[in-house]
Image (spheres, rainbow, N blue to C red):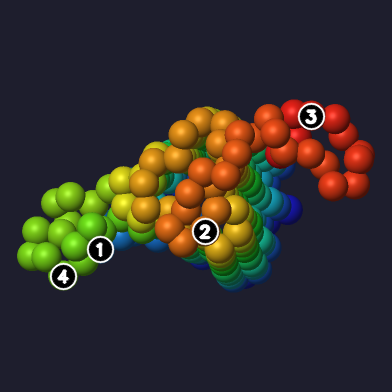
C-alpha cells in the first residue's frame, strides 16, 4: 500500500509489496543535485512510516523498515532486513550491512560503517569530526566502524574513527574514546574493558552461555 499523501521524486524505484505511510518524502535531491539525477532504490516489502524523509541516491535492500520521522540522507548503502527506529538520523555516505537494528533517536554521521547484524541502542551518538572548528575538518571526517554482531547500549557516545570489534558489547551511557577489542564488554567514561562477552550470564537463567 502506498499512501496518496507522499512526495515521490523522479528516479525512485520501489520494490513490490511496499507499505508507504502518509507524509513520506522519497528521493529528495541533496544540495547541488537536480531531482532525478541520483537513482534511489528501495527493495521489496519495505515498511516506511509517516514523516520519514529518504534523500536521493540511497540503495536499500529488501524488508527495510523505518519508524516515524526518520531522516536518511543521500547516497547510503543499506542491506536487507534493516530497521531504523523513530526519530533516528542517518547522514550521507553511510554503509549499513544486513540485519542491522538501529533503535529510536540514534545519530549515525556520514562515513560510518555498520556491519551485518550489529545492534545500535536508543539515543546512541556516533561522531565523525576530530576537530569540528578546524578549517579542514571536512577533509578528515570519519565515523565509527561497528563490526559484525557488535552491540552498542543506550545513550552511548562513540568518538570519531573508532572501531568496535566483532561481537563486542558497549555498555549503556559509555563514552568510547578508543578501539574496542572483539568479544569484549566495555563500559564507563572513558569506556574500559570489563570482561569478555563469553563471561556474561543471563540474570534470569533463561539461556546458557555464551550470552549477550
Res. 111 visible in picture? no
Label 3: state its secondary structure: loop
Q: Name the residue under label 4.
A: 133
Whether pointer 1 and pointer 4 mark residues with C-beta atoms closer than 8 Å, the reply is no
Q: Which of marks 1 and 3 is in front?
A: 3
Label 2: state its secondary structure: loop
Q: Nearer the viewer, mark 1 or mark 4?
A: 4
Q: Residues within 10 Å of mark 1 (few under 14, many from 20)?
A: few
Q: Which numbered disc, 4 or 2, marks the residue that appears first in the sequence?
A: 4
Q: How crowded is mark 4: few (under 14 residues within 10 Å), some or many (20 or more)?
A: few
Q: CA–CA distance between discs 3 and 4? A: 46 Å
Q: Mark 1 points at which residue?
A: 31
- Residue 10 in the image: x percent, y percent? 41, 52
What residue is rendered at 75% in x and 29% in y?
210
Q: CA–CA distance between discs 1 and 4? A: 22 Å
Q: Mark 3 points at which residue?
A: 209
Q: Which numbered disc, 1 or 3, marks the residue that appears first in the sequence?
A: 1
Amino acid at each position: 500500500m502506498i499512501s496518496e499523501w507522499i512526495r515521490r521524486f523522479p528516479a525512485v524505484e520501489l520494490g513490490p509489496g511496499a507499505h508507504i505511510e502518509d507524509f513520506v518524502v522519497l528521493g529528495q535531491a541533496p544540495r547541488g543535485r537536480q531531482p532525478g539525477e541520483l537513482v534511489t532504490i528501495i527493495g521489496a516489502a519495505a515498511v516506511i512510516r509517516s514523516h520519514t524523509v529518504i534523500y536521493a541516491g540511497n540503495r536499500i535492500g529488501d524488508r527495510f523498515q523505518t519508524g516515524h520521522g526518520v531522516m536518511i540522507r543521500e547516497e547510503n548503502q543499506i542491506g536487507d532486513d534493516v530497521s531504523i527506529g523513530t526519530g533516528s538520523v542517518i547522514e550521507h555516505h553511510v554503509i549499513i550491512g544486513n540485519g542491522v537494528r538501529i533503535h529510536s533517536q540514534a545519530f549515525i554521521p556520514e562515513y560510518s560503517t555498520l556491519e551485518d547484524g550489529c545492534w545500535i541502542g536508543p539515543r546512541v551518538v556516533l561522531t565523525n569530526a576530530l576537530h569540528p572548528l578546524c578549517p579542514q575538518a571536512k577533509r578528515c571526517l570519519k565515523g565509527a566502524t561497528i563490526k559484525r554482531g557488535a552491540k552498542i547500549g543506550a545513550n552511548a557516545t562513540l568518538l570519531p574513527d573508532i572501531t568496535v570489534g566483532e561481537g563486542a558489547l558497549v555498555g549503556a551511557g559509555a563514552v568510547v574514546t578508543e578501539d574496542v577489542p572483539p568479544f569484549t564488554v566495555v563500559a564507563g567514561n572513558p569506556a574500559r574493558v570489563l570482561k569478555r562477552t563469553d563471561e556474561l550470564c543471563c540474570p534470569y537463567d533463561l539461556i546458557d552461555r555464551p550470552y549477550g
